[in-house]
Image (spheres, coloured by chain):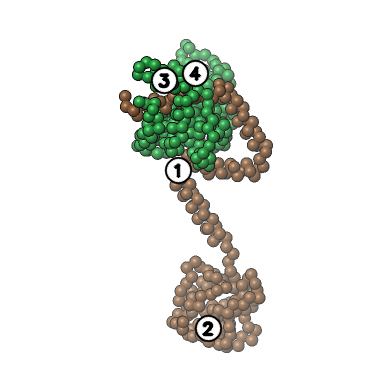
Amino acid sequence: MSDLTEIQRLIRLKRYENPPEDFVEHFIENLKERQRAEILQKSSMELFFERVSTYFEPVSTPQWAMAGGAVALVALMLMASIVTAPQTQIVVQTIPSAEPTLKATPQIHTPEDPNRVVAMTKSSDVVGPVASEAMDFGVGGVLIGGPIDAPENQTVPETQLLSRHFNSGHLKTAPSSGWFDIGSPSRDMLLPAGYESSN
Amino acid sequence: MFVYAPWRWIGDGCERRMVSMTELLNNSDIDDKTLVARAQAGDTKAFDELVRRYTPKLYGLVYNMTSNREDTADLLQDIFAKAYRSLKRFLGKSSFYTWIYSISVNMTLNFLKKRGRYSKVSLDDVDSNIANDPIFIEITTSKGGTMREVSVNELQEKLNEAMMKLSEDHRTVVTLYDIQGLQHSEISKILGVSEGTVRSRLFYAHRQLQSFLEDYVK
C-alpha cells in the first residue's frame, strides 16, 4: 500500500471526532431563537438591506453574471439621467426700436438665472446671408439665422431654434446630442457656413 | 411528490389504501426536493427537517476546516440562517445537497480569511469506537505486535495540527474527500472548479500531509 493511501486512511480517523449527541436538537432550537431575535431586534430597514444583500450575494450566481448586472444597472441609470435632464430654453429678446445694426449683440438668458446674459458672438464678425438676416430681424437672427415668428419675450425652445437653423444650412456643424450647453457656447458651432475662425 | 390534500390513495390495484396526512408528512421519509418545496412555501417544519438532516454533515465540514467547535457552532448557525433567507432563490438546478455545501464552504473560507492564521484550537471528543477501527489498531501496533505509545488524544492533536498546516483550499478538498467521503465530481460542483483541479489539490495536499505525519505512516 502506498504512503499516500496510508495518509488517506489516517486522515479518515478524524471522522470519529463528533459533537455531543444532543447537539443537533439544541442547535435547531438555538437557530430558531436566533431567527426570532433577529426579527425583533433589527429594524425594518436593516432587514430590508439584509435581504437585498443576500439577494446579490453570489450563492450560486456566477461572478461574471453579477458584474454584467452591475454594468447594466449603471447604464440604465445613465440613460435615465440623460432622458430626464431639463432642457435649456432660450429667451429671445427683441429690441423695441428694431434698428438694423451690426453692433447689436445677441443675448441669451439661461432659465436658471434670468439676469445672466451670455454674449454669443460679435455681430461684426458675422458676414454673409446670416448677417443680412440678422440685420433684417434685429438681434436674435444673428444666432438663429432667420426671422423668428415669435412675439416679444416669448420663450422659444432651443431645439426648435436649432432645428430651424440647421435646416437652413447655416451652421457648419450640428451638435451630435441634439442640444448643447448654452452657458459655454462653442464659437465655431455657431458660425455660418463659409466663415473661418480667425483663431 | 407532496400533494396538498387531506388524504390520497397510494399503492396499486388491490393494495390501495388511504393514508392520513400525518403519514405522508413523516418528514424523515421525504426527499430533499419535496422538503425544499415545502420550506419555500413557508413550511418551517420542512426546513427544520433539512437542518436536522444536514447539520451532522456540515458540522464535520466546518469543524475540520476551523478546528474549533465554538466557531463551528456559530458558523453553522450563520450558514443555515443564510440558507433560509436564500431559499426562495434556490431553483433546484443543482441538488440541495450541493447548494448547502457550496454556501457552507464559501462562508467557512470567508470566516477563515477574517479570523487569520492564529486561532485557539478547540477539539471535539473522539468517539470511543476509534479503538476498534482497523486503521487505528494498525498504526498503534508496532510490527513486533506490541502497542505503540500513541494515545487517541495525541493522534487527534497530530492529525489536527497537520490539517491546519495545509492551505485552506487543500484543507477543503481533504475534508470533503478523505473525511466526508464525497466523490471528485461532487466536490468539483461544490467548489465550482474542475475535477482535475480537485485531483491536483488532493495530490499536493496528501504529499504535504505525508511529510507532516511521516512518523505515523512508516
Marks 2 and 1 belong to one chain = yes
The residue under the point 37% across, 15% down is: B145
Among the chains pictured, the one given green colouring is B
Q: Distance between the residues labelled 2 and 1?
A: 64 Å
Looking at this view, is A148 or B183 the one in front?
A: B183
Q: What residue type is labelled 4?
A: Ser
Q: What element carries label 2?
A: helix
Of tags 2 and 4, the one toward the viewer is 4
Q: What residue sits right under mark 4 in the picture?
A: B128
Of tags 1 and 4, the one toward the viewer is 4
Q: Which amino acid does label 1 sit on?
A: Pro
Q: What element carries label 3?
A: loop
Asked whether the residues under the numbered discs 3 and 4 touch, taking CB atoms below 8 Å apart as contact, a structural biologist would say: no
Residue A68, position as x, y percentages in the image: 46, 49
What is the number of the mark on residue A133? 2
A147 displayed left or right of B204: right
Asked whether the residues under the numbered discs 2 and 1 touch, taking CB atoms below 8 Å apart as contact, a structural biologist would say: no
Q: How far apart are marks 1 and 4 (CA)?
A: 44 Å
Q: Which amino acid does label 3 sit on?
A: Arg
Residue A199, position as x, y percentages in the image: 46, 82
Q: Distance between the residues labelled 1 and 3?
A: 51 Å
Quadrant where the N terminus of chain A lies? top left
- In terms of image quadrants, where is residue A103? bottom right
Chain A: give its colour. Answer: brown
Q: How far apart are marks 3 and 4 (CA)?
A: 18 Å
Residue A7, position as x, y percentages in the image: 38, 28
Q: Distance between the residues labelled 2 and 4?
A: 106 Å
Neighbor class of circle 2 (other Cα within 10 Å; few <14, some 14-19, many 20+) is many
What is the number of the mark on residue A62? 1
Looking at this view, is B105 or A10 the one in front?
A: A10
